[in-house]
Amino acid sequence: MKNEALGYEWQNVRKELFTAEEIAASDLRVALIGELVKARQEKGITQKQLEELSGVKQPVIARIENGTSVPKISTILRVLAPLGKTLAVVPLEK
């Protein structure tokens, strides 16, 4: 119950500190990173193996996965392709 209260408080603080657009961008980044990591793990490959398959250096993949860089779309596409994934434009959920 205590964790729920903390989460609730963070959601309120988040709304006070950031615009709706900033929150949406952050949520999208987190979702994308999560899907990328999940796809790599489902394939059972390491970041180094993904480097060999994608041509994107392992340290870049690590920075993408830990959220410390904002990669170009072309880089994301290069990493996703050997994982059998791509990006799609879909309607926003209401």
Image: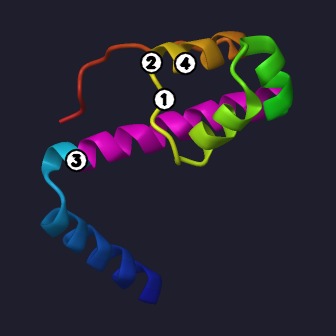
Would you identify the image quadrant in which residue 83 lies?
Answer: top right
Residue at numbered disc 4: 75
Q: Which residue does the image show at 58% across and 38% down from the upper left?
A: 64
Q: In the image, what residue type sits under mark 4?
A: Thr
Q: In the image, what residue type sits under mark 2?
A: Ile
Say above or below: 43 vs 25: above
Q: In the image, what residue type sits under mark 3?
A: Glu
Q: Position of residue 36 (x, y in %)?
A: 61, 31
Q: Quadrant of the N terminus?
A: bottom left
Q: Magenta segment range? A: 23-45
Residue at numbered disc 2: 73
Sequence-earlier tag: 3 or 2: 3
Cβ–Cβ under 8 Å for marks 4 and 2: yes
Q: In the image, what residue type sits under mark 1?
A: Pro
Q: Which residue does the image show at 65% across and 33% down from the upper left?
A: 60
- Kind of element beneath mark 3: helix
Mark 3 Cα within 10 Å, few/some/many (few <14, many 20+)? few
Residue at numbered disc 1: 71
User: Closer to the camera, 16 or 58?
Assistant: 58
User: Closer to the camera, 70 or 28?
Assistant: 70
Q: Which residue does the image show at 77% across and 35% down from the upper left?
A: 41
Left or right position of 31 against 6:
right
